[in-house]
């Protein structure tokens, strides 16, 4: 889920580390096609099967920090902390995007948006360094939707210095295509150097699929249903600027609306509400 591209990005670019022995940083296609089974030494350390009747507050929090001022990338949603947008039922997490206006007297952080949706995270509750991550989900498919499964670093990092791992992004302007990407100070979409790949997943809006991340000190692989389609190795110059992926990251699930990418073909208000359904989230640690 791409982050700020305005003032924060400008400040970040001014502070970029300088790479020596310059390799080209323009190549951003890291496509592979290889098996990605769960490692034999994987140990389950955290999970949510969504078997209850409400979101587990010991595992998840809500991110509504920019509801009043507006979210990044030209997004159009208000992230609600209410069952209309985030709820648990029938063994699933439901994140629902709706076309509606809210009463600002009832919701003081409301910024006048025409869409509501949900964003939850494990920030300050659970974070991990390395591991095998699996989220079984069914995605929405409507012009303007932008579901994502991604990780961000704990701590006080200017974006994208601390890194970002996008396990799954899918936008309504490209139905049945998912994207896996990693960002850092030297490799980031604002410079056209981001490292990632895309995969066509027919029926991703009709059936559940397993969206997976395998993260080790040397490699990040992203896959679907046990097969990797993106691989990035820790073999580029630049130190932290190229590979900040060695400290704890927390997990984020959200369904954004609109934005520069997701609304490239407009918004389909008549298709709303739309839902991102999550069957489970599982995090495994690997032997070092």
Image: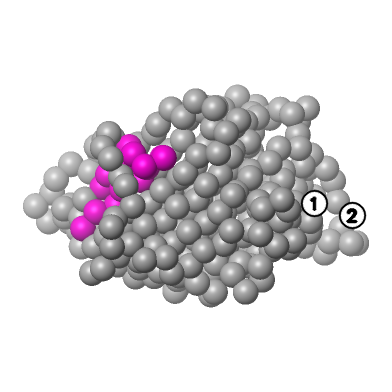
Look at 79% across and 56% down and name the residue there: 83
User: In the displayed structure, would residue 57 be above or below residue 7?
Assistant: below
State the residue position of label 1: 84
Q: Where is residue 238 in the image (x, y as percent from the top left)?
A: 20, 58
Q: Which residue lies furthest to the left in this view?
A: 21
Is residue 230 on the magenta stretch? yes
Instruction: Compare marks 2 and 1 and give the one earlier in the sequence.
Output: 1
Look at 63% across and 36% down and name the residue there: 140
Helix, strand, or loop for circle 2?
loop
Q: Residue 22 carries which label?
A: none
Q: In this view, does 112 lie to the left or right of 263?
A: right
Residue nearer the viewer, 89 or 252: 89
Is residue 227 on the magenta stretch? yes
Look at 80% across and 51% down and name the residue there: 84
Q: Position of residue 200 (x, y in %)?
A: 43, 27
Q: Where is residue 95 in the image (x, y as percent from the top left)?
A: 68, 49
User: In the displayed structure, would residue 171 be above or below residue 214?
Assistant: above
Residue nearer the viewer, 8 or 197: 197
């Amino acid at each position: 889920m791409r982050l700020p591209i305005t003032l924060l990005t400008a400040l970040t670019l001014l502070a970029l580390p300088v790479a020596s022995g310059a390799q080209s940083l323009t190549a951003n296609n890291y496509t592979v096609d290889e098996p990605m089974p769960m490692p034999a030494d994987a140990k389950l350390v955290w999970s949510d099967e969504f078997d209850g009747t409400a979101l587990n507050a010991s595992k998840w929090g809500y991110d509504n920090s920019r509801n009043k001022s507006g979210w990044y990338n030209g997004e159009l949603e208000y992230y609600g902390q209410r069952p209309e947008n985030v709820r648990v039922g029938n063994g699933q997490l439901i994140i629902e995007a709706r076309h509606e206006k809210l009463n600002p007297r009832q919701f003081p952080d409301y910024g006048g948006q025409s869409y509501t949706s949900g964003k939850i995270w494990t920030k300050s509750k659970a974070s991990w360094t390395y591991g095998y991550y699996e989220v079984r989900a069914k995605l929405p498919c409507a012009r303007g939707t932008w579901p994502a499964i991604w990780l961000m670093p704990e701590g006080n990092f200017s974006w994208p210095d601390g890194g970002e791992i996008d396990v799954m992004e899918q936008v309504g302007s490209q139905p049945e295509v998912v994207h896996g990407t990693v960002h850092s100070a030297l490799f980031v979409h604002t410079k056209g150097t981001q490292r990632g790949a895309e995969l066509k997943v027919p029926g991703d809006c009709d059936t559940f699929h397993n969206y997976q991340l395998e993260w080790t000190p040397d490699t990040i692989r992203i896959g679907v249903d046990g097969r990797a389609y993106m691989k990035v190795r820790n073999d580029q110059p630049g130190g932290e600027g190229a590979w900040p992926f060695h400290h704890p990251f927390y997990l984020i699930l959200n369904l954004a609306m609109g934005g520069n990418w997701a609304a490239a073909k407009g918004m389909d208000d008549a298709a709303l509400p739309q839902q991102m359904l999550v069957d489970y989230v599982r995090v495994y640690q690997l032997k070092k």
